[in-house]
Amino acid sequence: MIEFDGIGHHYGKRTVLSDVDLSLPERRVAFVGANGSGKSTLARMINGLVLPEKGSVRVEGLDPAKNGREVRRKVGFIFTNPDSQIVMPTAGEDVAFSLRKSELSKKERAAKAERVLADYGLSGYAEHPAHQLSGGQKQLLALCSMLVLDPDVLVCDEPTTLLDLRNKRRFAETLRELRQQVVLVTHDLELLDDFERVVVLDEGRVVADDEPRPALTYYRKLVE
């Protein structure tokens, strides 16, 4: 369960979120809205990348502002540009790096990284230079680096923006099969047909909150 209670936030003099109240128990939830609507800021509050100026956030009862370490163990975050998350020379090393604080040996971390890469479409790429992967492969690598930690929640902030149509579909299919609760911020509305809930934000406020069809119908009318 993710809960937002009376969330308000500003960047300088600009209000980006105002009086946002949401409880999100569903496994597949999307945030949509025009650029500057506040959707990415709201998503980043789930794991404490942004802390609200007003109100509070709870993830399974934990406040990211007070229990940041515990929340980050539960919440993985995928950014728009996977290059911002890749920190090691090879794909295998990058995934294993996520396990650096675990009790596993270096050999065990490498083996686990290789298994996760294989599970999500990158079998045989453990030794491949990470920054020489294709755009779609890099996004899968970023996903693997989060999933190797087995979080309960995965927040994805416009993860398909830089991908071609084939890789968008592949990434969406991968998300569909995950056990984790997924919160997806996106402009790719065609990805949301099988989501349970779509939250529409406009100028920092929730203006629609429903199943995909009625919520997206409202959003399309809003931006016409």
Image (spheres, rainbow, N blue to C red):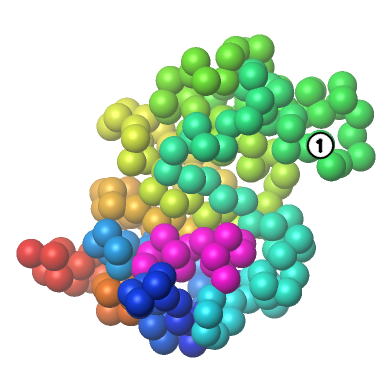
Quarter of the rendering containing residue 141? top right
Callout 1 amino acid: Arg
Residue 219 within the magenta-colored segment of the rendering: no
Q: Is residue 152 above or below residue 165?
A: below
Which is nearer the eye, 223 or 111? 223
Quadrant including the N terminus: bottom right
Residue shown at the point (78%, 37%) measured from the top left: 99
Percent of width and height locating residue 94: 67, 28
Residue shown at the point (64%, 36%) measured from the top left: 145
Which is nearer the eye, 103 or 169? 103
Q: Is residue 151 above or below residue 137?
A: below
Secondary structure under tag 1 reads: loop
Q: Is residue 27 visible?
A: no
Q: Is residue 56 above or below residue 105?
A: below
Q: Is residue 222 visible?
A: yes
Instruction: Give the tally of numbered discs.
Output: 1
Residue at the left extreme, as displayed: 224
Quarter of the rendering containing residue 64? bottom right
* Residue linked to disc 1: 100
Q: Left or right of 135: which side holds 224? A: left
Which is nearer the eye, 135 or 218? 135
Quadrant including the C terminus: bottom left
Q: Which residues are magenta?
A: 38-51
Which is nearer the eye, 100 or 174? 100
Residue 40 within the magenta-colored segment of the rendering: yes
Percent of width and height locating residue 205: 33, 79
